[in-house]
């Protein structure tokens, strides 16, 4: 008896009577859906790698990776904090800089230590070298920071300590050992000279594509469903963001400048030529946020919109979902001020007709802060909703992630059947999870009727998939008839 893996045995050429066992792969009946809550965030920070996506799942992760939050509109930590409060929990964060940022340094026992990353957070690093009490030839080097944590290394010489630090991918500093190696000596040094540089330009936030990606383009292939260049309000970047979002299956959240007017917002969008379901444009009515580190801050609305979408299933809209942590807006003022300016129906109509969304209070459901439109910038009524963008990207991303396994297979009835089974199973699972409404909301065609021999002979196989999405209740009309003359009819439920 011989055991074969699937495909290794040609059963048409057997000549020796024997038992042949083939191990077949488990049949794939459905594809696992791709992530719909992952947020790609590009911003500034006082620490951390530049142009490299970092996995963040909590504020603890964010503080360890990028240092303390800063009172700036572009700050990564502030955006992550806001989004987490709304329900998001999965981020890929990219730090950008203008190139003038500097790493902090310190000198200890004749050796220069340099912070592992540029930025002002490095000035809080403290390096302490202590002699072991029992083995006096051995020393312990501790590099610590109030927010970034601490790292400890042991060795009898500077080269040994430097090698240990170099081997640590999470090290807070690097050691430069001079040609003439000094002896270890107990002491302490505080780093200084680190700086954040100036504010990056729009071009630096967008970054460069290619083999060495920076800025927004560093998010390629990270599986993000939502993206934002935090605090970037330059309308010349909007169509570039749209093109990136379409290519990556990412819903880009953009915004206008703080204190914007409706007329200017509409003019900026028109001037940019932005008309795409890949971008959600938030009106420049920035929000007041009570930050636990920096106090009351005026912040762009992007992270609120991204956060609420990041916590919702893809068939859900941001419309009328309560937002948390908002204590006011530029239009309404701070809640503590007692102001209560609201948007009129005419103002909201002007924004939504132009494809611009806004966060305001009240919402249709009550006196709370919420995304008021749930729309993207598309001028097509069929594709201008949050759910079209997110659900289309979700389904396309899921198919893209799993259907490639069929490439290279022999074109035959079995292949057509397998393709249909996987597609139907995947869509059926979406019905079961509530993403799609019913089994009648999708259809799959993949057989000889849409795959004629003239095409299959050239290696082409086509599967036609139709999916009907569930609508969003945007215009709820309740007809009330009242009066003493009204005749009321009541229906009796059947037993």
Image: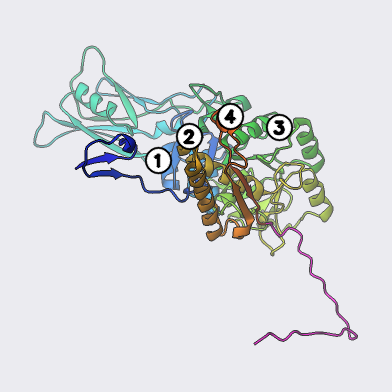
- Give the class, few, some or many, for how many residues have Cα within 10 Å of label 1's Cα (few <14, many ≥20): some
| Residue name at image x 44 percent, y 30 percent | 49
- 472 in the magenta segment: yes
> Which circle marks residue 345 in the picture?
none
- The residue beneath circle 2 is 407
Q: Give the CA separation, mark 4 to mark 3.
A: 13 Å
What distance separates the C-alpha of mark 2 from that of mark 4? 37 Å
Residue 476 is situated, as x and y percent measured from the top left of the image, at: 76, 63
**Magenta-colored span:** 471-495
Q: Nearer the viewer, residue 269 or 156?
A: 269
- Percent position of residue 329, x then y: 68, 50
For marks 4 and 1, give the CA distance. Answer: 22 Å
Please state which of the two labelled residues, at mark 3 or mark 1, is closer to the viewer. 3
Callout 3 secondary element: helix
Question: Which is more N-terminal, label 4 or label 2?
Answer: 4
Q: Distance between the residues labelled 2 and 3?
A: 41 Å
- Residue at the outermost top position: 179
Q: Which of marks 3 and 1 is nearer the N terminus?
A: 1
Q: Residue furthest left?
A: 134
Label 4 or label 1, whichever comes before in sequence order: 1
Q: Name the residue under label 3.
A: 235
Crowd around label 3: few <14 · some 14–19 · many ≥20 (10 Å): many
Residue bearing mark 4: 205
Front of the two marks 2 and 3: 2
Q: Which residue is drawn at 33% across and 34% down?
A: 170
Q: Label 1 vs label 2: CA separation?
A: 43 Å
Q: Calculate the distance from the C-alpha at mark 3 to the C-alpha at mark 1.
A: 33 Å
């Amino acid at each position: 008896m011989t055991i074969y893996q699937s495909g290794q045995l040609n059963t048409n050429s057997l000549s020796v009577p024997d038992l042949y066992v083939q191990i077949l792969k488990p049949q794939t009946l459905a594809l696992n859906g791709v992530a719909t809550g992952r947020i790609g965030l590009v911003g500034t920070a006082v620490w951390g790698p530049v142009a490299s996506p970092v996995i963040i799942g909590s504020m603890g992760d964010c503080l360890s990776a990028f240092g303390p939050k800063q009172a700036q509109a572009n700050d990564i930590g502030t955006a992550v904090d806001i989004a987490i409060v709304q329900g998001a929990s999965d981020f890929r964060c990219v730090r950008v800089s203008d190139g003038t940022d500097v790493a902090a340094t310190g000198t200890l026992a004749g050796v220069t230590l340099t912070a592992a990353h540029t930025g002002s957070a490095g000035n809080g690093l403290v390096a302490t070298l202590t002699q072991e009490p029992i083995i006096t030839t051995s020393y312990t080097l501790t590099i610590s920071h109030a927010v970034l944590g601490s790292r400890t290394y042991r060795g009898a010489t500077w080269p040994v300590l430097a090698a240990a630090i170099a081997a640590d991918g999470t090290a807070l500093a690097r050691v430069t050992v001079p040609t003439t190696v000094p002896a270890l000596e107990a002491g302490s040094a505080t780093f200084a000279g680190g700086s954040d540089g100036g504010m990056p330009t729009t071009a630096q936030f967008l970054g460069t594509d290619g083999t060495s990606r920076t800025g927004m383009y560093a998010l390629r292939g990270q599986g993000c469903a939502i993206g934002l260049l935090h605090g970037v309000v330059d309308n010349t970047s909007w169509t570039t963001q749209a093109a990136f979002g379409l290519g990556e299956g990412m819903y880009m959240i953009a915004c206008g400048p703080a204190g914007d007017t409706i007329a200017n917002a509409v003019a900026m969008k028109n001037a940019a030529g932005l008309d795409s379901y890949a971008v959600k444009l938030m009106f420049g009515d920035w929000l007041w946020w009570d930050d636990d580190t920096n106090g009351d801050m005026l912040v762009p609305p992007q992270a609120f919109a991204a956060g609420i979408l990041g916590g919702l299933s893809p068939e859900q809209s941001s419309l009328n979902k309560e937002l948390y942590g908002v204590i006011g807006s530029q239009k309404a003022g701070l809640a503590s001020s007692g102001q209560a300016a609201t948007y009129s129906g005419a103002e909201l109509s002007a924004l939504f007709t132009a494809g611009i969304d806004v966060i305001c209070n009240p919402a249709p459901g009550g006196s709370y802060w919420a995304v008021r439109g749930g729309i993207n910038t598309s001028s097509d009524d069929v594709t201008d909703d949050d759910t079209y963008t997110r659900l289309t990207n979700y389904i396309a991303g899921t198919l893209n992630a799993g259907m490639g396994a069929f490439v290279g297979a022999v074109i035959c009835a079995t292949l057509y059947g397998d393709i249909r089974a996987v597609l139907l199973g995947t869509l059926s699972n979406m019905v079961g999870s509530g993403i799609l409404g019913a089994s009648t909301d999708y259809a799959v065609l993949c057989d000889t009727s849409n795959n004629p021999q003239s095409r299959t002979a050239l290696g082409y196989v086509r599967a036609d998939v139709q999916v009907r999405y569930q609508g969003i209740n945007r215009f709820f009309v309740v007809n009330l008839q009242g009066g003493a003359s009204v005749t009321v009819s009541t229906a009796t439920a059947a037993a």
